Image (cartoon, grey):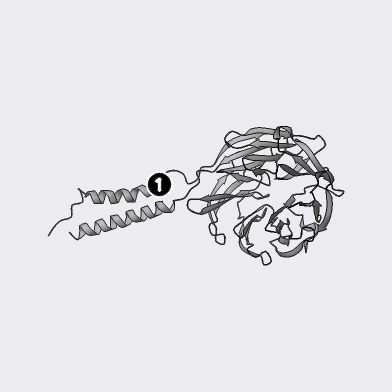
Amino acid sequence: MMSVNLTRPSIFSLFAAILLVLPLVLCTGGPAFAYSVTDTYWVDDSVGYVDVVGSRVYAPASSDGLYVLDIGDPTDIQLLGHYEDENARLGRVVVRDGYAFVNDYNFGLRVLDVHNPANITEAGSWEYTGNPYRAEGLALKDNYLYYTPWASDIQILDVSNFNNIQQAGTFGIRGYTSESGCVMTTIIQDDILYASYGYGGFHTIDVSNPTNPIYLDGVYHPEKSDDHRFFLRDGYAYLAGGDYGFHIIDVSDPANLANVFSHEWTEGEVLNGSYSIVLGPKFDGGLQYMFVWEGWAADCRMHVWNVTNPENPVEVAVYPKLSGYPIGAVSDYYNGYLIAGLRSEAVRTYDVTEFHVPEPATILLAFGGICSVTFAVRRRMKM
């Protein structure tokens, strides 16, 4: 009878052991998520919103005007240009084809020519005779801008001629009342306008005829869900719900919306407006992540969710917000970095490039190593 010699493994066994250990090292060697501040650009008033176009950040700083920043190197934010009007108080902004459409809380709509950031000029304007405060719903379709002031209907503006912007109509959300807040975010995709309505739900409107919108459907959430910032991707809307948490909505059929997932903040989590929700790109063979800021206070946190399956997402990390500066309502993502305005007068970049999980190839390698070791042990035991 032959004995098993465990002190002098064969070359095959050593190779199998390496195959087993290597993936484990790759999977566990270091933190799963590196979250750090990479740079901060200080301004002179609150930055509640940012719009990232390419490697440029357009950041309205309320009474301090509009900043255009270069984040081609997110670790070294550079100023490209600054526009300031002492009578303006700038809020939400969207940028298209070298023009920034920005709400002025004191006036209405301003259109800024940002082709040359070093020489930003006003290309046109439209005065809203009501209260233009917090017109956060700005969306463009062709030559029409859908502009929504607080507690008011959507104003449909013809912006084909910046020197003569005209109102082309209005549209009210079915079931909307001023008590339910106002349009917080609007996005137009494939002739559908998606609108979050504060405490009034999430809605879809057909704008294939820009001046004659048709209401399609809406989903309503619990009273404390202040529906705010959202992103659209692959037939789903990812919606921040303020003090409630967040929701994921199936929008594959805009006329038949379905809420497929809701997460409610639990006891001990920080409330007061988790408005800023950001989708990162696809990592590691298709996995994708959602970053959710929880609260504005100094002790708020950032949550990371794996939303590869939007109807069954998994929270994979929770981290304290770095520094005590409150995050603005609208953040964005660029090339491995989160871009956020700070209500404490700054624009900041956060490095999330090292967030990872085992790649499929690594998992296969680990599986192969385990199988090889199992085979080797069984082979030697039979000897």
Residue situated furthest front in the rendering: 161
Q: Residue at x 73, y 33 (%)?
A: 119
Q: Residue at x 61, y 40 (%)?
A: 55
What residue is shown with label 1? Answer: 26
Residue 5 percent coordinates (x, y): 18, 52
Q: In the rendered image of this protein, does residue 202 appear above or below residue 327?
A: below
Residue situated furthest right in the rendering: 129
Residue 298 appears in which quarter of the rendering? top right
Q: Quadrant of the C terminus?
A: bottom left
Q: Residue at x 52, y 43 (%)?
A: 353
Q: As shown in the figure, which amino acid type bears the numbered disc 1?
A: Leu
Residue 177 appears in which quarter of the rendering? bottom right
Q: Is residue 298 visible?
A: no
Q: In the rendered image of this protein, does residue 269 appear above or below residue 298?
A: below
Instruction: Judge from the rendering whether residue 224 lies leftward or rightward of residue 6; answer left or right.
Output: right
Residue situated furthest left in the rendering: 1
Neighbourhood count class around disc 1 (C-alpha, 10 Å): few under 14, some 14–19, many 20 upward: some
Q: Residue at x 55, y 46 (%)?
A: 319
Residue situated furthest bottom in the rendering: 256
Residue 21 percent coordinates (x, y): 34, 48
Q: Is residue 66 visible?
A: yes
Q: In the rendered image of this protein, does residue 29 appear above or below residue 306?
A: above
Question: Secondary structure under badge 1?
Answer: helix
Figure label count:
1
Residue 333 percent coordinates (x, y): 60, 45
Q: Quadrant of the N terminus?
A: bottom left
Residue 296 percent coordinates (x, y): 66, 45
Instruction: Judge from the rendering whether residue 11 lies leftward or rightward of residue 335; answer left or right.
Output: left
